[in-house]
Image (cartoon, rainbow, N blue to C red):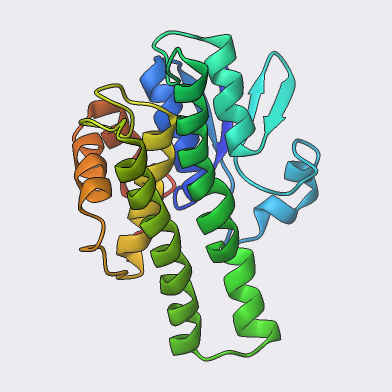
Amino acid sequence: MFKLFTYWRSSTAYRVRIAMNLKGLAYEPVYVSIPKLEHKAQPYLAVNPQGLVPALVEDGKVVAQSLAILEYLEERTPQPALLPEGRHERAYVRALTQIVGCEIHPLNNVRVLKYLEQRLQVSADAKLAWYRDWMAEGLASYEATLQAYAMAGDFSYGDQVTLADVCLVPQIYNARRFSCPLDAYPRTMAIASRCERLEPFIRAFPDTQEDAVVS
């Protein structure tokens, strides 16, 4: 069985939980508390020296970084497929995943927000404005890509759930958490809403994870 080192509110771990559920792959969750800095403590660093969640372990071998884990799972368990067959279509889906994983998330993750607050001493309002600005830019790009490529259907690619949707839904969770305006992205939000009604997405939902502390 897989071991998945996860934290309930980590959007990157959320991505992997969704993908594992979609693939029907059972895993043992190992909870790593980000607020308690367990990801920076030696027991976890011995597993993943990057000091980040998630990390996936199979047969004693560790795969780190969520996008790499998603690709690993796709290669290991090709069905049900989370990438289309055509190379142009696969590139389109990967581009959407990277809007989330490379454009939005790196600027809005916990490390960046703490740096703004603690090192640069920006106000809470300024930090929130930063978060919302980069969220808006990324989601606008996602929306524009859906429109320009005209490959979307019920989901980001036709009627097939793909890695794009796996990455999108956790980002929308974050956007709602920070009360980001979302009306400007109707296609994106409709797709996210359809995904959120699917059982593999429901089971991965952060607030229902065993390590969740919801206030």
Counting from the top left corner in percent of width and height, residue 114 is at 61, 74
Visible residue check, residue 33: no
Query: In the rendered image of this protein, does residue 23 appear above or below residue 98?
Result: above
Q: Is residue 152 visible?
A: yes
Q: x%, y% of residue 130?
A: 49, 77
Residue in the image at 44% along x and 23% along y: 89
Q: Does residue 214 appear left or right of residue 198 in this picture?
A: right
163 or 184, which lies in front? Answer: 184
Residue drawn at 53 percent across, 64 percent down? 108
Residue 159 location (% of width, % of height): 24, 23
Q: Nearer the viewer, residue 42 or 59?
A: 59
Residue that appears at 64% across and 31% down: 68
Q: Position of residue 45 (x, y in %)?
A: 78, 44
Image mark count: 0
Where is the C terminus found, in terms of image quarters? bottom left
Which residue is depicted at the point 59% across and 35% down?
Answer: 67
Q: Nearer the viewer, residue 37 or 76?
A: 76
Q: Can you tell which quarter of the image residue 203 is in? A: top left
The quarter of the picture where the N terminus appears is top right
Q: Who is closer to the viewer here, 19 or 185?
A: 185
Q: In this view, does 104 lie to the left or right of 142?
A: right
Task: Tell me: 17 left or right of 110.
Answer: left
Q: Residue furthest front?
A: 148
